[in-house]
Image (cartoon, rainbow, N blue to C red):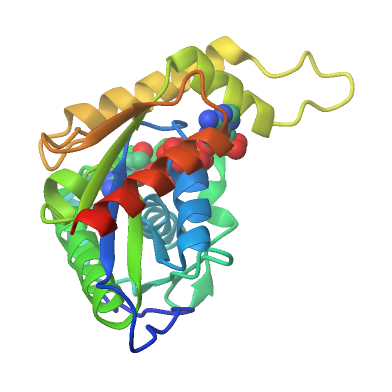
Amino acid sequence: MAATLQGATPVPPDAPASVVVAIDGPSGTGKSSTSKAVAAKLGLSYLDTGAQYRAITWWMLTNGVDVDDAGAVAAASGKPVIVSGTDPSAPTITADGADASGPIRTPEVTAAVSAVSAVPEVRAAITALQRDIAAEAARTTAGIVVEGRDIGTTVLPDADLKIFLTASPEARAARRGGELKARPGDAGVDLEATREALLRRDAADSSRKTSPLAKAGDAVEVDTTDLTLEQVIECVVTLIEDKRRTA
Ligand SMILES: Nc1ncnc2c1ncn2[C@@H]1O[C@H](COP(=O)(O)OP(=O)(O)OP(=O)(O)O)[C@@H](O)[C@H]1O
Ligand SMILES: Nc1ccn([C@H]2C[C@H](O)[C@@H](COP(=O)(O)O)O2)c(=O)n1
C-alpha cells in the first residue's frame, strides 16, 4: 500500500517543531469537522482514517470480495493502493487510482465498514499507511491532525496531543439527522433509527479484538454535547497552542 503526502504546507525555515495531534471518538462526535477546521486554521495536514477504512471496504465490495468472509477480506487486504490527500481544505481519497470520496459515503459502505475494519490484516495494512503519512507530515510540514478510533491508543501512541471527543447519542443522532435531507412528502428523518444505527456501529467498533475504539489513558476528553462546532474548534486550537507553548 502506498503512502503519499499530497497538498502539504511546506515548513518555513524558522518554524516551531511540528506537532502530531490524535483525535478519536465515536461516530458523529465531530471528529472530521473539528479536525479539518483546526488543521486549516493552524496550517497543519489532516488525515481522515475512517475514509481509508471506507475506501478499502469500497474496493472489496467493487472487486467481488465477500465482506462477511474474514478470510477473504484478509487475503485481499494487501491488494488495493489507498492514497490519502492531506490538505484539510480539500482532502482526497483514492483506491487503485479511482476517486473514492463519493462512493465511500454510501449506505452499503457504511453498513460493511465495521466488519472489514475488524479484520487484523486490514488494520495492519492501514495502520502502516497511517504511520507513514504521519511521519512524513511531521518531517516535512508543520504537523498533522489524525482522526479516527484508535489513533491515540495504537496508531500514534507517542502523539504530542491526544483528544477524545464524546457527545450524547441523542446529540449525535440530531447532528446526523441534520445531514440527511428529508425529501418533500417524506415523514422526515427517523432520529430513533439514526441513533440506533450509531450505537450499533459504536458497539461493533468498541468490541472488536484488534485495536478497538477506546480513549487513550493520556487523552483529553471533550464532551461536545452542549458545545457548538465553533466552540469545539476553539477548544482544540487552544489545547494545541498550549501544548506547543509548553513543549
Ligand atoms: N459541536 C457540534 N454541534 C453541532 N453539530 C456538530 C458539532 N460537531 C459536529 N457537528 C455536525 O455533526 C455532523 C457529524 O460530524 P462529523 O462528521 O465531524 O463527526 P465524526 O465524529 O467525524 O463522525 P464519523 O466518525 O461518523 O465520521 C456534521 O454534520 C457536523 O457538521
Ligand atoms: N481509526 C479508525 C477509523 C475508522 N475505523 C472504522 C470504524 C468506523 O465505523 C469506520 C468508518 O469511520 P468514520 O468514517 O465513520 O469515521 O471505520 C476504524 O476502525 N479505525
Q: Is residue 52 visible?
A: yes
Tally of numbered discs: 0
Above or below: residue 19 compared with residue 149: below
Q: Position of residue 156 (x, y in %)?
A: 16, 56
Above or below: residue 206 compared with residue 216: above
Considering the image in quadrants, where does the C terminus appear? bottom left
Q: Position of residue 216 (x, y in %)?
A: 15, 37
Considering the image in quadrants, where does the N terminus appear? bottom left
Q: Residue at x 21, y 73 (%)?
A: 135
Q: In the image, is 81 to the left or to the right of 157?
A: right
Within the image, what quadrant is residue 131 found in?
bottom left
Within the image, what quadrant is residue 86 found in?
bottom left
Q: Residue 140 versus residue 146: which sits nearer the camera?
A: 140
Q: Residue 108 versus residue 216: which sits nearer the camera?
A: 216
Above or below: residue 207 compared with residue 212: above
Q: Is residue 65 visible?
A: no
Q: Residue at x 46, y 68 (%)?
A: 43
Q: Residue furthest front?
A: 245
Above or below: residue 51 compared with residue 132: above
Q: Position of residue 48 (x, y in %)?
A: 40, 55
Q: Residue furthest right?
A: 184
Q: Position of residue 41 (x, y in %)?
A: 52, 59
Q: Residue furthest bottom?
A: 13
Q: Residue 51 versus residue 86: which sits nearer the camera?
A: 86
Q: Residue 204 versus residue 39: which sits nearer the camera?
A: 39
Q: In the image, is 97 to the left or to the right of 50?
A: right
Q: In the image, is 192 to the left or to the right of 146?
A: right
Q: Residue at x 17, y 33 (%)?
A: 208
